[in-house]
């Protein structure tokens, strides 16, 4: 007989956990203890929760799973952008990328990090330039699999620090005074707004003061432009930030590289973004990867500027990272700088990413793709 699928403890809100513990006749303070073990101490096992009575630990283990992510591969060194490849309970692979804050930005070496998390295994949207969609869509991530990317990354960083310094590891010991991850970008594998319910649940857990404690304004959701879900997000109470993968300022160019543009063309996308803006009073970001000969012509800068102006958006220009097996390339530096200058000439606030990210397959989906293909003997 197959067992029914169990709920994972890291997909429960505080209220849900409190209700369960109350039903078991536990005192009210138990919920706080469990949450402290999960989010502040990043406990990976029930046994680690030493201040809970053994029978309660057994009951929890009977009722809930406590999944952790298994680290399969890591790329990149200490203090640089690092990529983590995780194996999920069903064997699927996903990626998270840890990006240290630019020390110059804060005036001193800092412990601040941004984590880029995945929301699906694969992606159904099939943008022509992207590694994540190359092998199609497999499934949505559960809330705890999104939450656990933050906790597992922090566990990995803590244990590395331990190896480097001899410092005692603390995952099952003392409380962690602060998170290693204090900014989140939902820009990993998958289309976050196509996994709307699980995404929102996970972000609320990561945002809650008793959970991840990461401010809503420090969480940026990136979408390929699902207009109805953008409107739905606009109606939520949280002030999550929104980034839109535009990559083309006319339907002709955008449709060529992003099939989703057929379903939600630029006029419709812009109308949904205007709604979001009205509801949130927040700056939207347009991501615009520059791909040689595809969308890097100066003719795109005028319609891009018009859209940005209308929606009070800023534009992040990102030179394309080549993906194995795909024909696209990054334009020359001169072309990228020229595109930026033309945009700024039209009065747009824009930035151009200049660091070299290509060396660790910085574009999401690539490490997984390569590993899957090696495992399957095709790589
Ligand atoms: N599905 C969402 C979020 C994940 S993709 C979205 O499309 O927005 C995150 C960002 O990485 C997107 O802007 C995407 O267009 C970009 N991206 C994908 N492949 C890339 C590559 N090879 N080089 C640079 N950026 C890439
Ligand atoms: Fe999916 Fe985003 Fe990649 Fe497009 S760019 S295939 S929406 S992950």
Image (cartoon, helix red, strand yellow):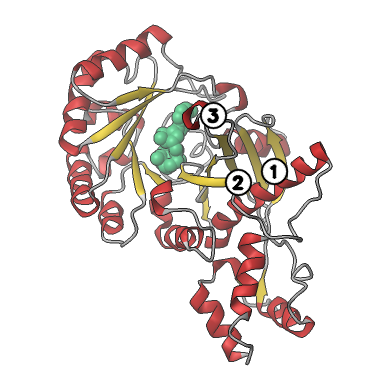
Give how far apart the Cα atoms at labels 3 and 1 are.
Answer: 18 Å
Determine which residue is flagged by label 1.
157
Please give left or right for residue 286 compared with residue 190 in the image: left
N-terminal of the two: label 3 or label 2? 3
- Residue at 28% x, 32% y is 314
Q: Dot 1, crowdedness within 10 Å: few (<14), some or many (≥20)?
A: some
In the structure shown, which secondary structural element does the residue marked by tag 2 occupy? loop
Residue 298: horizontal and vertical position, in percent?
25, 14
Give how far apart the Cα atoms at labels 3 and 2 are.
Answer: 15 Å
Give how far apart the Cα atoms at labels 1 and 2 are.
Answer: 8 Å
Q: Is residue 127 visible to us here?
A: no
Q: Are marks 3 and 2 in contact (CB under 8 Å)?
A: no
Mark nearest the camera among 3 and 1 is 3
Determine which residue is flagged by label 2.
180
Mark nearest the camera among 3 and 2 is 3
Q: Dot 3, crowdedness within 10 Å: few (<14), some or many (≥20)?
A: few
In the structure shown, which secondary structural element does the residue marked by tag 3 occupy? helix
Determine which residue is flagged by label 3.
103
N-terminal of the two: label 1 or label 2? 1
Residue 68: horizontal and vertical position, in percent?
68, 58
In the structure shown, which secondary structural element does the residue marked by tag 1 occupy? helix
Residue 122: horizontal and vertical position, in percent?
52, 45
Quadrant location of the N terminus in the rendered image: bottom right
Q: Dot 2, crowdedness within 10 Å: few (<14), some or many (≥20)?
A: many
Q: Are marks 1 and 2 in contact (CB under 8 Å)?
A: yes
The image shows residue 96, relative to residue 104, as above or below, that is: below
N-terminal of the two: label 3 or label 1? 3
Residue 368: horizontal and vertical position, in percent?
62, 38
Tell which of 221 and 119 is nearer to you: 221
- Residue at 37% x, 44% y is 223
> Which of the four quarters of the rendered structure image does ligand 1 lie in?
top left
Tell which of 142 and 275 is nearer to you: 275
């Amino acid at each position: 007989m197959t067992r029914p699928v169990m709920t994972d403890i890291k997909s429960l809100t505080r209220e849900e956990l409190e209700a369960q513990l109350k039903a078991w006749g536990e005192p009210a303070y138990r919920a706080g203890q469990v949450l402290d073990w999960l989010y502040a101490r990043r406990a990976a096992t029930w046994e680690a929760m030493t201040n809970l009575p053994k029978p309660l630990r057994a009951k929890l283990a009977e009722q809930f799973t406590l999944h952790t992510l298994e680290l399969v591969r890591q790329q990149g060194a200490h203090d640089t952008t690092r990529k983590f490849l995780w194996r999920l309970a069903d064997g699927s692979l996903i990626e998270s990328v840890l990006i240290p804050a630019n020390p110059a930005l804060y005036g001193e070496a800092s412990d601040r990090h941004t984590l880029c998390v995945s929301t699906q295994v694969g992606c159904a949207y099939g943008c022509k330039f992207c590694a994540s969609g190359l092998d199609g869509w497999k499934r949505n991530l559960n809330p705890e699999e999104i939450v656990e990317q933050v906790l597992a990354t922090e566990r990995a960083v803590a244990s590395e620090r331990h190896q480097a310094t001899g410092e005692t590891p603390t995952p099952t010991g003392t409380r962690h005074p602060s998170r290693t991850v204090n900014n989140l970008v939902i820009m990993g594998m998958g289309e976050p707004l196509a996994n709307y319910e699980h995404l929102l649940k996970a972000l609320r857990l990561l945002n809650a003061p008793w959970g991840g404690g990461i401010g809503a304004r420090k969480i940026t959701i990136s979408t390929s432009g699902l207009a109805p879900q953008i409107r739905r997000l606009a109606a939520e109470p949280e002030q999550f930030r929104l980034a839109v993968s535009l990559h083309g300022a006319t339907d002709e160019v955008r449709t060529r590289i992003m099939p989703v543009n057929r379903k939600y063309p630029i006029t419709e996308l812009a109308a949904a973004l205007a709604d979001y803006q009205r509801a949130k009073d927040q700056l939207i970001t347009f991501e615009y990867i520059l791909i040689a000969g595809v969308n890097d012509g100066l003719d795109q800068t005028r319609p891009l500027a018009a859209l940005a102006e209308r929606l009070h958006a800023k534009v992040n220009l990102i030179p394309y990272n080549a993906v194995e097996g795909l024909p696209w390339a990054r334009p020359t530096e001169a072309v990228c700088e020229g595109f930026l200058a033309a945009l700024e000439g039209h009065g747009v606030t824009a930035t151009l990413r200049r660091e070299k990210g290509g060396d660790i397959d910085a574009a999401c989906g690539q490490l997984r793709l390569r590993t899957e293909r090696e495992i399957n003997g095709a790589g």
